[in-house]
Image (cartoon, grey):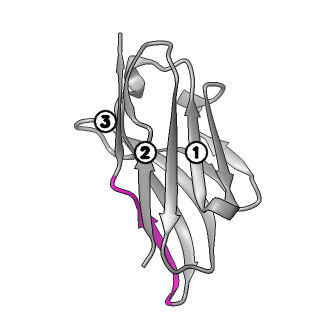
Amino acid sequence: QVHLVESGGGLVQSGGSLRLSCVASGRMFSINTMNWYRQAPGKQRDLVASITRVGITNYADSVKGRFTISRDNAKNTVYLQMNSLKPEDTAVYYCDAAVVGPSGSYDTWGQGTQVTVSS
């Protein structure tokens, strides 16, 4: 079983920056697409950004130009650089990965990291 652990969340003022990291560990052959989602209180979990194994990226309209997703395949890690943060970016941010392992292909999630942007 592969586990994902997010880090880098915290409290930041509006206009500030944070960098989230998500590290995958466990038995796996490879990781395909990796995603960052977020969920604000009382709202659904929404896709923020995704990146394929070869580096093709996709962003939600609300974060384009402010957030950058990247990955280091050698370290099984995905990052989310968040700049020009706004109060509406406040949410729990979750990492998701499409894993290929000995038991087959499956999705796995991290436990989430809180991001709070004060106005």
Residue 47: horizontal and vertical position, in percent?
A: 49, 46
Cα distance between the residues tagged 2 and 3: 17 Å
Q: Quickly name the residue at label 3.
A: 40
- Looking at the image, which is closer to me, 62 or 36? 36
- The nearer-to-camera label among 1 and 2 is 2
State the residue at coordinates (31%, 36%): 40
Q: Is residue 37 above or below residue 84?
A: below
Residue 93: horizontal and vertical position, in percent?
A: 40, 43
The residue sitting at the bottom extreme is 103
State the residue at coordinates (42%, 56%): 5
Q: Which amino acid, by three-letter code, is at mark 3? A: Ala
Q: Magenta: predominant secondary structure element?
A: strand
State the residue at coordinates (62%, 80%): 29
Q: Is residue 78 above or below residue 113?
A: below
- What label sits on residue 7 in the rendered view? 2
Mark 3: secondary structure: loop
Task: Read off the magenta span.
Answer: 103-111
Residue 3: horizontal and vertical position, in percent?
A: 42, 68
- What label sits on residue 65 in the rendered view? none
Q: Which amino acid, by three-letter code, is at mark 1? A: Tyr
Quadrant for the C terminus in the image? top left
